[in-house]
Image: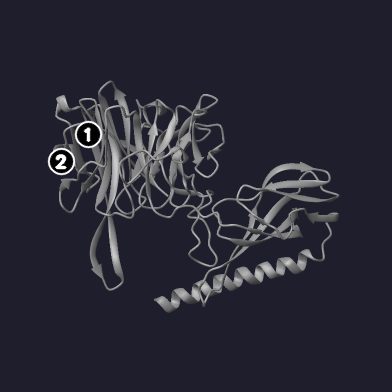
Amino acid sequence: MKSILSSILLTLSLCGLFSACGNDDDSSQIQLVTDYGVTEAGQTLRPGDIVHIYGNGFQANDCVEYDFRWDTGEQMFPEGFRGPVAAEIAESRPDGIDVRMPYRMPPSRVDIFLRREGDRMLMGKILLSDGQTPKDFRLYALDSQRHTIDRIGADGTANASANVWDISTRPDFHSIANCVYTYGLCGLSKAHGIQQPFFLDFCTGEWRPLYTTGYGTLALVTGKHSMVSAFVRNQKGSYYLDNISADLEQSNYAVPTRMNVGSGSVMGSASPLPEGLSAEQFGDYPGVFAQDQRLLILLSAKIGEGKWAPVLYSPSRFHVQETVEADALIPFYFSVRLPATESGDTFATKVGYVVSDSADKGGSRFYLLDVPQSEWWTQEPFAVLRGKVISVSHNFERPGTFTVLSEKDGTYTVADYDWNQGEWQAPVHTATDMTYSAIAWGN
């Protein structure tokens, strides 16, 4: 198996390198502009720095691309490659184009190309310093009153100001989820009165819209598949599932040549909402992929004050389950490690709902959904928490656990549940002045 994988990676690496060489040779014969160059040629720049490309003859539709090469430290694959990568244009003029260097890349040798329709011209070369983002998972909290995203440290305290992000330009940002290695959070916020998915980039503090058709978004969906998806509306008023995180840049350079996780629509055809339900009743919490596959999704809909409905989605329709009386109904998931096999560790995903109530109503109950047709609400909960659950998140690096933000008698707590031990762990964060409305593990 290892030799097969090595052969595949070698083939990909060589294909990428040969392709890049071919582009260089072709570009040397093409003169798209004259008297050209890169002001910073030969210099080492940082992520976010502006590069100035100059010359005569630039056209309005010209764009800029990068080819990246980096040392891997591996004897078999000494050089990594990625390209072409579209550059972010900061300013375009008849005599030049200014572009911004990207984040999340390893220390790289960068070739800068001018692209005009199907032709490329090499403009110059620079060096890029290390822009890779943290690989370890960290816990982030959404403060809906102060309008910030805070990083909660291992000691249970919110970290210094360097780890606080201002979200006051989108104060309604909610339903947060992370796509691995993107160093940021996806969530929902209204734009021009329509609920849309956005990405908050931790590198820049900037917002990126993830779906711009002008139609509404029902809910985000997350799970073990290393992506964030969304139910988005089409012209006919039906909803389909799309992988909105496909184009997010990931700081994951473990192989010489790579592509981002997934792309395009991921499952099913467009489906209308069940009769009696509206889009405004969804989206308080992300849905979750179920059963180690993408053929079943758990959602929740707010039916009225203190009433919620579990909604299951299969590839072509939504299925409304029996109404539940609760302060909140939160889909959740976590992975568990199965007994090791000859091929190594294997994992399974467990999914379910938290029926969340305050302590005076008995607290919150955690139910698993093992069989789609089972009446999970008639089963015994596998865990109970004597407080109101506000948010649930899972760390991929810690199978068999999930993290819960809860409130009881005015005290807010962040604590882990250990599936293998069947018990709650000591809280990692407790405060009476906390105004967090959601938590999410991410990197």
Vertical arrangement, residue 146 with respect to residue 154, above or below: above
Mark 1, residue position: 355
Residue 87 in the image, given as x and y percentages of width and height:
66, 50
Q: Residue at x 28, y 20 (%)?
A: 305
| Residue 261 higher or lower than 153, as above or below | below
Disc 2 residue type (three-letter): Pro
Mark 2 secondary-structure assignment: loop
Q: Could you tell me if residue 85 is visible in this image? A: yes
Where is mark 2, residue-wise?
A: 381
Nearer-the-camera pick, 332 or 35: 35
Q: Residue at x 16, y 42 (%)?
A: 383
- Answer whether residue 231 is visible to the viewer in this image: no
- What is the x, y in percent for residue 207? 54, 37
| Number of numbered discs overlaid on the protein picture | 2
Which quadrant would residue 345 be assigned to in this image? bottom left
Task: Please name whichever residue, 298 or 275, is drawn nearer the observer in this view of the structure.
Answer: 298
- Residue drawn at point x = 14 percent, y = 37 percent: 378
Amino acid of disc 1? Val
Where is residue 348? Give x, y as percent.
27, 56
* Horizontal side of residue 90 vs 103, given as left or right: right
- Residue ranking furthest to the top: 305
Task: Specify few, some or many for label 2: CA neighbours under 10 Å numbering under 14, 14-19, or 20 or more.
Answer: some
